[in-house]
Amino acid sequence: MKEKVVLAYSGGLDTTAIIPWLKENFDYEVICVCIDCGQEEELDGLEERALSCGAAKLYIEDVVDELCDDFIMPCVKAHAVYENKYLLGTSMARPLIAKRLVEIARKEGATAICHGATGKGNDQIRFELGIKALAPDLKIIAAWRSDKWTLDSRESEIEYCRQHGITLPFSADSSYSRDRNIWHISHEGLELEDPANAPNYDHLLVLGVTPERAPEEGEEVTMTFEKGVPTSINGKKMKVSDIIRELNKLGGKHGIGIVDIVENRVVGMKSRCVYETPGGTILYEAHQQLEELILDRETTDLKLDMGNKLAQITYEGKWFTPLREAVCAFIDKTQEYVTGEVKFKLYKGNIIKQGTTSPYSLYDEDIASFTTGDLYDHHDAEGFINLFGLSTKVRALKLNK
């Protein structure tokens, strides 16, 4: 019997060409695995395409709820943002994809896992670190880094498939390189490769519109959270995945969550990408508005550091590590009382506060008001300031001498 290889299969040109390439160069039986993270219509026709290209079988694994509950929500709770802009849409999905690839490889008795990520990107790192953490005995084949991979353009891949009797629904026309899941869609290539160019948003956007094209009237939204997890929109209780879908519609309609960033890849180069994360942007902001009422100053300060650390861990593909588990344990503790209701208005790319309430709010109107009350006497501040600024005053006195 031939050895089996599990191929991370998207149905795109690269992974379609990899099927006959694996059979020709390694004599493997190819098991294609497509991980459904919410790509929607991109999954249409995949089984017929995979089998017609020589795959022995195709798995389509729906992991949307697991992605939302176990990978996206930890990042939302932490307010994990990479380089102040990127909401980790691709990064959060990759460890789950690696996990499911390993599970199918075990089920099929495969000896190797193959992916089509390029040697310049972050995804090769995320896939391979995930596989190494969960199945260090499995061989990893990175097609684009293999000496046997000689296909260096869309044209050469299409010609290779044609030579192997494969009819493709692809053309050699240039298009954006995209990655889509329930959380976001990313766009790279074409005019974006030159940072001096403005994005062609009329051609580029998929999930929504620019703020200029958004409705002239704002739309008010009410959300509830329990222990940091969203539970309802406008009074309707939903699971997390459905909340993200609904927020995507609302955010896309009002021009929310479009980010144009030049980011630092793990491999050392800079790359430019436009991300659409309409629902995610709303969810991050609503969660943070609620946290403002509940977390004390010291916890908030440390949580900022932990959020940045989780963003780095996730971006670098180190999800299955003790450090990630430890950071998430800290974050989960901070969410114990993040329960309440958030109201906001969506208007032309903006998320505008309309009021926040929580039974665990630390905001006390009697203390915060300008009126002197029993809990706070203005005179108490004098002694505090003297002690708090003592080192500053002593240094100034010494310098004056």
Image: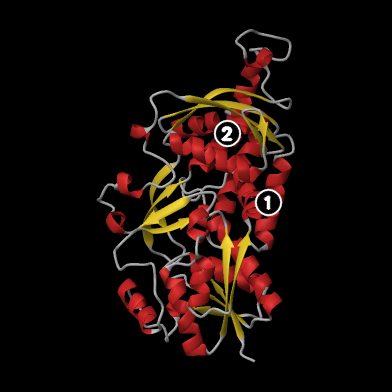
Query: Which label number is shown at residue 328?
Result: 1
Q: Residue at x 55, y 53 (%)?
A: 38
Instruction: Name the quadrant containing residue 318.
Output: bottom right
Q: Residue at x 47, y 64 (%)?
A: 122
Which quadrant is home to the N terminus?
A: bottom right
- Residue at image mark 2: 286
Q: CA distance from mark 1 to mark 2?
A: 20 Å
Q: What is the three-letter code of the residue carrying label 1?
A: Cys
In the rendering, at what x and y percent does residue 310 appear?
59, 52
Q: Residue at x 54, y 50 (%)?
A: 182
12 or 128: nearer the eye? 12
Q: Nearer the viewer, mark 1 or mark 2?
A: 2
First-in-chain label (1 vs 2): 2
Neighbor class of circle 2 (other Cα within 10 Å; few <14, some 14-19, many 20+) is many
Q: Amino acid at mark 2?
A: Ala
| Whole-percent x, y for residue 353 in the image | 53, 25
Mark 1 residue element: helix
